[in-house]
Amino acid sequence: MGIVILIFGLGFLTGFHTGESHHIIVQPELDTNEALDSVAEQLPEGSRIIAKFTDDRHALYYLNSGHLMKFDAKSKMLDEVNLNDLNTNVKIYYDDHVDTTGIISAKLSPDQQYLILTAVTMAPDDETEGNYSLASFKLDTRTMNILPYTPPVPKTKEKKDSLPPVRHKEKPKEEEVVTPKETYPEAGDIVQPEQQEPPKE
């Protein structure tokens, strides 16, 4: 009978709101890729997988209720990635009773090296209620270093300086009506009087 490793999520895997715990079972004889697949199938409701690395990192990252979780398939350990512990200049604001706190979005960078995270933060020395802002970070998935991140400005279509010439439809030329000139007799011409009909009585 195989030994079963039971990973307990004490509330942070499913319902931060309900206080329920969630159990993920990983059999120790599974190789790293099988362990990753097994955990991916058992994630709590509402979780979203951010990245699954089958290379030398052997890790699965997912987001649940504003918390970033990492499953290490080599050690078969599931841990929360606490950005506040990784960098003292980062202070993520978590409120387990509000869905829009903690890490609100996460995606894998195009080079697959970093997780790009957007989180609700507060100043490290400020405990004032409601004094929150959004900040973006990039987490190196190899070294677990976290750095501030400035998202690139979306590219807009550039307007062309030289527009093609506007062609106006030409009106057809109106033919000039030439009125015939009256010709007058020149000196020496014999002019015949026009014949007129006699008036009728």
Image: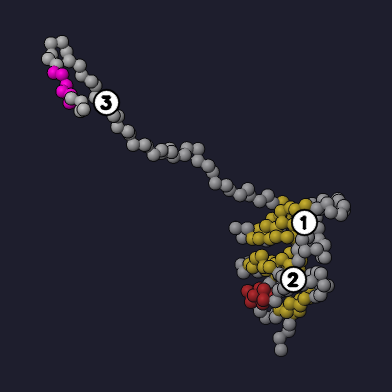
Whichever of callouts 1 and 3 sits on the residue coming sooner in the sequence is: 1
Q: Which residue lies at the image location 64% right of the left edge and 68% below the top edge?
A: 52
Q: Is residue 103 above or below residue 199?
A: below
Q: Which residue lies at the image location 43% right of the left edge and 38% below the top edge?
A: 166
CA separation, marks 2 and 3?
A: 102 Å
Task: Pick whichever, 167 or 3, lies toward us.
Answer: 167
Residue named by callout 1: 120
> Residue 44 at what x, y percent from top left?
73, 73
Quadrant (top left, top right, bottom left, bottom right) of the N terminus: bottom right
Residue 179: give its label: 3
Quadrant (top left, top right, bottom left, bottom right) of the C terminus: top left
- Amino acid under label 1? Val
CA separation, marks 1 and 3?
A: 88 Å
Helix, strand or loop for disc 2: strand
Helix, strand or loop for disc 1: strand
- Amino acid under label 2? Leu
Q: Are marks 2 and 3 in contact (CB under 8 Å)?
A: no
Residue named by callout 2: 78
Helix, strand or loop for disc 3: loop
- Amino acid under label 3? Thr
